[in-house]
Image (spheres, helix red, strand yellow):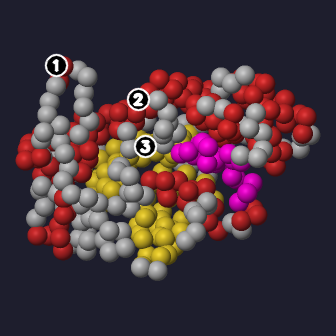
Amino acid sequence: MSKPPIIEVKDLRIWYRLREGDVKAVDKIEHLEIREGEIYGLVGESGCGKSTFAFGLMRLVPPPGEIVSGKIYFRGENILDLPEEEFRRYRWKNIAMVFQAAMNSLNPVMTVGDQVAEAIMLHMRVSYEEALEMVKELFRSVGLDPVRIKDYPHHLSGGMRQRVVIAMAIALKPDLVILDEPTTALDVTIQAQILELLKTIIQKYKMSALFITHDIALEAEFADRIGVMYAGEIVEEADVFGIFERPIHPYSKGLFASVPTVDRAKERKLVSIPGTPPDLIRPPQGCRFAPRCPYRKPICEREHPEMRVVAGHRVRCHFAEELVDVPPEKLWAGYLY
């Protein structure tokens, strides 16, 4: 009998309650699962709901955000039903997170060693001295000199601070680690080092991971499966090879065709998707991508498409079958540059 997924999400809605109306940042993700030992990639434009979804998994949605409905199962147990005090035993021990901006994740008036030690002592019966020894070992594993445990965040470079946050996330060897744009604001060389470090750690400790980014090229190297998110919804999901070789949803086709290639043999014009994402207080009645889609028909503006399986992909599009073998360049011919 196969093991259940580590995380299974059903009918999840996360909205921000504003005076102007409810921002539907995550609007009914009907079904998403992250399997044992898998790296699941989540891609999409800024503002599509990726980070809000990650904060939902950690039950750290900031006010005025609210998990409106849905279920999040961790190894079969719905963690949204647990009282906050009880859920704390999951946070960091079972589900941990590497946040997008390391400087904002660290307390400026505590040494970085004490911050990591604090997370350890909250979950393990160890003394402060024992916790610091564990922190030194963690720092070695992420490529930091252990003497840095006495430093404050502002003493460290951006890459070093990100390594501290990674050390904190893996301190208790969680089953699932959420990586929310872990290389934002780092230069290209440091980005490569951080990603290589993360991949090594995930494999070493046999963790599952949710890797969130708007950089599709990183997902190609990192993820096993990819979900494409647009305007608070998953619009396509498939294994990494399938979605790169044959994206189906018009948004996926445009997104992947907008990435330049360094292979001169495959040199091609790039796609520029017109327009902007919709207002999530008043999203379109039909398909949320319809106003920007080159293939839209009247039904797209009237009826919201359901997620269904087409050619091995899960796709949210009325015309997915017709688009399976349409090359991105042909679909987006009027928007090449």
**In which quadrant will I find the N terminus?**
top right
Q: How far, Cα to Cα, is label 2 from label 1?
A: 20 Å
Q: Residues within 10 Å of mark 3 (few under 14, many from 20)?
A: many
**Outermost residue, front side:** 154
Mark 2 or 1, nearer chain start = 2
Disc 1 marks a residue whose amino acid type is Ala
State the residue at coordinates (38%, 44%): 214
Q: How far, Cα to Cα, is label 3 from label 1?
A: 27 Å
The answer to whether residue 333 is visible is yes
State the residue at coordinates (14%, 30%): 268
Q: Which residues are magenta?
A: 87-107
**In which quadrant will I find the C terminus?**
top left
- Residue that carries the numbered disc 1 in the rendered image: 265
Residue contact between numbered discs 3 and 2, judged by CB atoms under 8 Å: no
Q: Nearer the viewer, residue 132 or 32?
A: 132
Is 303 on the left or on the right of 215, as rendered?
A: left
Residue 4 position, x and y percent, is 55, 49
Dot 2 falls on a residue whose secondary structure is helix
Q: Residues within 10 Å of mark 1 (few under 14, many from 20)?
A: few
Q: Is residue 41 above or below residue 71?
A: above
Residue 311 position, x and y percent, is 24, 46
- Residue that carries the numbered disc 3 in the rendered image: 213
Tell whether position 102 is magenta.
yes
Q: Nearer the viewer, residue 169 or 260?
A: 260
State the residue at coordinates (43%, 64%): 25
Q: Nearer the viewer, residue 163 or 34?
A: 163
Tell whether position 310 is magenta.
no
Mark 3 or 2, nearer chain start = 3
- Residue that carries the numbered disc 2 in the rendered image: 221
Disc 3 marks a residue whose amino acid type is Thr
